[in-house]
Image: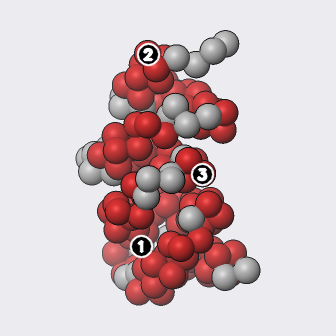
Amino acid sequence: MKITEEYIREQIQLLYSRDSNTGYAALKELQDASHEDCMVYNHLNEFFDMLENKNSFVRTRGLVLIAENAIWDEKGIIDRFFDSYLQHITDEKPITARQCIKLLPTIAKHKPELKKRMADALHVADLSCYKESMRPLVENDIENVLAQIHE
């Protein structure tokens, strides 16, 4: 099936669905399309807007699609708005924070000039907002990603 602009817009709307299965399916469709060409990348600003959503699933979907489209970012949009991405290293929801952290190597692969900003943000991340049960998991994620981006 040929991916059209209309189809991409429909999938982006579904990312906001209250039904998690619908939102996840739309995310997968857009991830797959992101690997094919830059059509999804043209909506990168919308994905950054998603990072401000009150719903953590929507924020996570935005994080994923930003990372997936780093390969196409010749305009430097990610560079300009990267601080808003990095804020989610300590997202109020630890699951979203963990996804943010785990996606950083994907961005680093295509945007190595951002590695220092990533590392700096990871080193200063204040994890005291997380329960004792979650903190070691986030700390481990940070250690793993620091090792990956310094390879």
Q: Amino acid at mark 2?
A: Glu
Say whether disc 3 or disc 2 marks the residue closer to the N-terminus.
2
Image quarter of residue 3:
top right
Image quarter of residue 42:
top left
Q: Amino acid at mark 1?
A: Lys
Give the Cα separation between the discs numbered 1 and 2: 43 Å
- Residue 7 percent location from the top left of the image: 48, 17
Give the Cα separation between the discs numbered 3 and 1: 35 Å
Q: Residues within 10 Å of mark 2 (few under 14, many from 20)?
A: few
SS at mark 3 in the image: helix
Q: Write down the residue under mark 1.
A: 131
What coloring was used for the rendering? secondary structure
Q: Write down the residue under mark 3.
A: 71
Using the image as rendered, state which of residue 48 and residue 18 is in the foreground: 48
Residue shown at 34%/68% (left/top)?
A: 83
Q: Point out the frontmost of discs 3 and 1.
A: 3
Q: Using residue 58 as the reference point, say whether residue 69 is left or right of it.
A: right
- Residue 96 percent location from the top left of the image: 45, 56
Q: Write down the residue under mark 2.
A: 6
Q: Amino acid at mark 3?
A: Ile
Q: Residue furthest right?
A: 151
